[in-house]
């Protein structure tokens, strides 16, 4: 009986160890602001969503010295998701 329990336990451990998940790498976030984030409000919203989806430990500090947020007078405000 002990052998059966030992073999069952080993099989369960082996099956659980095999369920490691996918090996997809998260999308990389650059260490500077992309040009399309300064071109339009939609580009800025997309870039901010990408930055917000990345864990703080996975990204480097951003150089925002050259970042000029878009300031259109004729566009409606966009909701960040």
Image (cartoon, grey):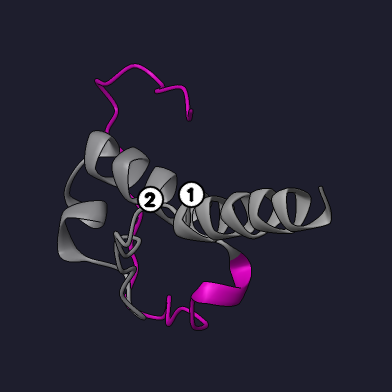
Residue segment shown in magenta: 56-81
Nearer-the-camera pick, 63 or 73: 63
* Residue 75 among magenta residues: yes
Verify CB contact (< 8 Å) between mark 1 and mark 2.
yes
To which quarter of the image does residue 6 belong?
Answer: bottom right
What x and y, as percent, mark residue 78?
Answer: 40, 23
Pick the residue in front: 79 or 40: 79
Residue 11 image position (x, y, % from top left): 57, 53
Numbered label attached to residue 53: 1
Residue sitting farthest toward the right = 2
Q: Identify the residue at image location x=64%, y=60%.
A: 10
Residue corresponding to mark 2: 50
Magenta region's main secondary structure?
A: loop
In this picture, residue 34 sits left or right of residue 4:
left
Is residue 4 within the magenta segment?
Answer: no
Task: In this rendered view, identify the residue nearer to me: 51 or 65.
Answer: 51
Residue 64 image offset from top left, x and y in percent: 43, 75
**Quick one: SS at disc 2?**
helix
Residue drawn at (29%, 37%), measured in percent from left and top? 41
Q: In the visual, does 72 lie left or right of 5?
A: left
* Residue drawn at 62 percent across, 49 percent down: 12
Q: Is residue 74 above or below residue 26?
A: above
Circle number at residue 64: none
Q: Residue furthest front?
A: 1
């Amino acid at each position: 009986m002990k052998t059966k329990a030992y073999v069952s336990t080993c099989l369960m451990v082996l099956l659980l160890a095999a369920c490691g998940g996918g090996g997809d790498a998260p999308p990389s976030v650059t260490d500077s602001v992309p040009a399309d984030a300064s071109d339009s409000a939609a580009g800025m919203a997309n870039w901010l969503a990408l930055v917000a989806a990345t864990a703080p430990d996975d990204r480097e500090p951003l150089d925002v010295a050259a970042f000029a947020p878009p300031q259109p007078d004729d566009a409606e405000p966009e909701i960040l998701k």
